[in-house]
Structure formats: structure tokens, C-alpha cells
Image (tube, grey):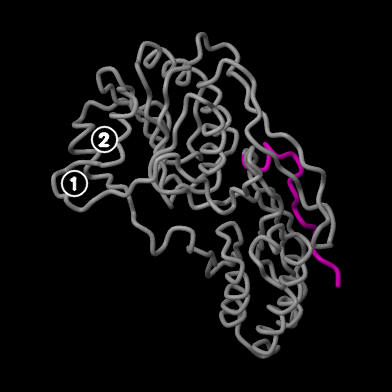
Amino acid sequence: MAFKKKIVFVAFLALFSLGCERFYFENGENIPQSQIFEEAWTFTKQEYSYFELKGVNWDDVKQKYLPQINDQMSNDSLFNVIGKMLDELKDGHNNLSSPFNRSRSWDWFLDFPENYDATIIEREYFKGKQRYMDGLIYLDLDSIGYVSYRSFSNEIEDENLELLSKLIVDKKGVIIDVRNNGGGSLTNAYKLASLFTDVDYFAGFDRFKIGPGANDFSDWQRVQVSNYEGIEPPFTGKVAVLINRKSYSATSFFSMFMQARPNCMLIGDQTGGGGGAPSFTELSNGWLLRVSATQTQDNDSYDIELGVKPDIFLNMTQSSINQGKDDIIERALIELSK
């Protein structure tokens, strides 16, 4: 069976920073639904990187869902079956997209405490005093600088990174709040992390799926974060990164980058994971399928697909919420003021 040309990003940094290139082909008419199912299953088997970590036998999964497939079924029914099959992997980077729907696993944050309330931050902390710099929102809390970053898809321009550097240079500590940040460009994750180191350092390891076998991977490579050239001096004081279960994908990478620094602590709940960068294909009916095709581990060889764990685990309490207080921000202020 011939696939449409798949889109595989082989440069780790470019995996998240480049737009998704689409390849268009002339779709044949009357393509059997069983063929579409087979294409989706086979591409996932060849490209997916976390079968062993997730403890999933993909051949067994096929036998579970194949009996539900017939060539007379509707597109909507076929989509639902393939979507449920992908959900067996519990991976938010595994998606099936069509003109009428998009499947995704949400288990990385559902059924866990939210640990974030935008209204409290807006009314009780910002109070109209915040400063907007691209995707960064800055608030001066006397001796502590507070930075909120809601999506790594929001580009950070060099001039605003330089401005942020000047705003925090004399601070006793800095809070970086990436709760509810679902990810985006890995370039921005590197860029922001580079502001908080005066040396180049290794933050973990990554490797790529390079063949159809379950263990066909490239060699492990070191993930390096470098000081942001041109910004002097970098901030090397204490940093608290606030995370929760909705911190995902590039946000997990950023959390890993920061946790590798001795002057940084992570506070809150663990991130939702998302440690595998995706590989794409267009199925014969035009639907787009993507699956995780890399693995990333921190310096202790812990796979961040499982989520980056905080140094200080903390949930927000309802009593504090009722008082208009954010327990995680308040704990960060205490830790940074010591």
C-alpha cells in the first residue's frame, strides 16, 4: 500500500518553529474505507515513538478496532473509529483532522485540578498595571518580577526580550507563569529560557524515530540551551516557573530547560507532557494524521512525555480562591523572597 508523502521534521528545533507544510495530491474516487483505516494504523505503527512507554501493543489494538470497519460505513463513523483507536495511546500530539472534525486525547489534563484562575490574576494581581510585550505579560511586584506567557505560539520579538531583561535585571527573583500554556513554537521556549543563563548548558536528551521497527531510533543527542547572545547581563537570580496539568508540549520542554538550572524551581502540579514532536501524513481521502515521532528525556533520563514534575508540588485551595488569592503565586513570592 502506497502512502501519500509523509511530512517528517528532522531538525528538532524546526519541528515546532516551522509551519506545517501540506502536500496535496489528486484523491482517487471511491477509496475503500478499509484502506483509509489501514493507512492510519500502518503510519502510526511505523512512526509513533511511545508504544513501549505507554505499554500498548499496536497489533492488539488493530484487532480490537478492525471488526468495526466496513467499506459501507460513513465518513463520520470511520473518523470516530480511527479517533478512538488513536486515543488508546493517550497522547495529545496524536490527531486525526478532517473538514468536519478533529480528534485529540485530552487525558493529560482532564480530571486534574485546574490550579489556575485567570479572573483572580486579572482582578487581584494585575489590576490594570500589567504591561503587554508580544505574548509576554509583565507585572512589577516590587522586588519580584512576574511574567505571564499564555502560549508559546505567540512570537517573542528580540526587542521585547531585551526590554524584559532590563525590567528584571535588578529584581530579587522572577516568576514565569506558564500555567494553561498548551505549547506552540519550541523556538520561543529556547528563546525565553536563554534569558536566564549566563552559560551554555545541557537540559536533556532527544532521539528520533528513523525506521518502521518499534526500536528504530537515532542515537540519543544532547539538548543544549545557550545564553541569549546580545543580552547583557542575563538574569541569574532566583526563578520560579509556575506549571499545571494544562502546561503542555513546548511548555513541558521549557519547564525541562528551566529545571536544569540551579537557580530555578518549578511550583504547582506536573505538566501534562507532550514530549514527542510530531510526524504528519495525508491519508488517501485527504484527512491529515499526525503522531509523536520523537522522544525527549531530562538529564535524569526521565521521559517528559509523562509530564515534568515540580520541585514544589502545590494545588490551589478553594478557601484561597474564595479570598481572591492564588496559592501558587503566593508560594513563589515566599520562595523568591527568602
Q: Nearer the viewer, residue 55 or 97?
A: 55
Residue 112 sits above or below residue 243 on the image: below
Say left or right for 310 vs 260. left
Dot 2 corresponds to which residue?
Answer: 330
Magenta stretch holds residue 12: yes
- The alpha-carbon separation of the residues under discs 2 and 1 comes to 10 Å
Q: Nearer the viewer, residue 274 or 297?
A: 297
Q: Name the residue located 51 percent from the left edge and 28 percent from the top edge.
A: 192
The residue range painted magenta reads 1-16
Q: Secondary structure at mark 2?
A: helix
In the picture, the disc for residue 320 is 1
The crowding category of the residue bearing disc 1, from other C-alpha atoms within 10 Å (few below 14, some 14 to 19, many at least 20), is few
Q: Is residue 282 left or right of residue 309?
A: right
Image coordinates for residue 147, horizontal then vertical, percent: 37, 29
- Marks 2 & 1, CB-CB < 8 Å contact: yes
Identify residue type, mark 2.
Answer: Glu
Q: Is residue 146 left or right of residue 54?
A: left
Classify mark 2: residues with Cα within 10 Å, few (<14), some (14-19) or many (20+). Answer: few
Tell me which label, 2 or 1, sits earlier in the chain. Answer: 1
